[in-house]
Amino acid sequence: MLKKKIVLLAMAPIIFAINSCVAINYSESKTKSSTTETTVSSKQALSVSTQEAVQEALAKMSPSEEKMLKNCLGGIAASGAGEYKTAIQFYTECLSVLPKEGSEYPAILMYRGFAYYSDGMSKKAIDDYNQSIASQSKGIHSKDTYIRRGDAYSQLGDRNTAIKDYTKAIELDSASAVAYNARARVYSELKKHTQAISDYTKVLKIDPDYLHGYINRGLALSSIGNEKEAIEDYNKAIGLDVNYAAAYYNRALSQSALSNKKAAKIDFQKAADLYLKDGNSVDAQDALNKIKTL
């Protein structure tokens, strides 16, 4: 037991470094039916003090412990590069020797679960998330694990269970814009637009500059026939990014629904121009086709 405690203490600065550099990043597709995808991305550079702590921890490690660390970091690097099968191999090797008593074990389980999810193996991802949740208390990973498990259930089409996981994440962190956004997306998929609007409003209260929150709330408002408020949200999105094609496209649809044909034509043309600028000829042609129907 003493040996394991020494390993866990030595690993602490390493895992802190990992958590400092890795974050859940939710990016939204620039289309009318906006969806949410989870990616792992670089968060920030390590502070000098953290780098020194990492180097000190490495100096105390045995060759086997150093190999374990390299597998953990190799998994994170491979996952960040989109090489999920390779990431799974690294994480599996790391987990085979990583002591289960510390916070590192559920963290690596969560990362492997994400790699499984990203590779389309949601059932295996859920297995890892279940193990991660079972082996942690109210640690820093709990909220993220529930969010990710919710994503996996959503990928399998089990949206009601996904909502339960997002709700649990919100209970753990009521200021989690990511959890509210994910739950709102699933509510929209279930045609529960009022609940979706409520959650998107909470997202925007937490983060008033969240561009996709305005787009998605606008879509939900449009779904219940509230085109004027939808246009207000698209206006706010354009105010945050004047080159966001989907905002013009969606605003054009709302203008068209209100029989504002001139305004709709202008927005469809603007969307087409921006889509072409981004190299998206398919959506550009779709926007141009919409002009012909007005």
Image: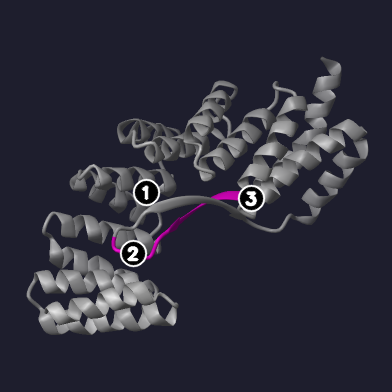
Q: Quick one: label 1 or label 2, which is nearer the N terminus?
A: 2
Q: Is residue 294 left or right of residue 71?
A: left
130 vs 21, nearest the viewer: 130
Q: Is residue 254 magenta?
A: no
Check disc 1 and report the residue beneath it: 181
Query: Residue sitting at 70 percent across and 21 percent down?
Result: 101
- Relative to 37, say whether 106 is above or below: above
Q: Quick one: label 3 or label 1, which is nearer the N terminus?
A: 3
- Relative to 62, say whether 228 is above or below: below
Dot 3 surroundings within 10 Å: few (below 14), some, or many (20 or more)?
some
Calculate the distance from the C-alpha at mark 3 to the C-alpha at mark 1: 27 Å
Q: Could you say where residue 250 lies in the image, as x and y percent from the top left?
A: 25, 69
Q: Could you say where residue 263 lies in the image, as x and y percent from the top left?
A: 16, 82
Which mark lies nearer to you, 3 or 1?
3
Residue type at mark 3: give it.
Glu
Q: Are the two marked residues, 1 and 2, in contact with CB atoms closer than 8 angstroms?
A: no
Q: Quick one: label 3 or label 2, which is nearer the N terminus?
A: 2
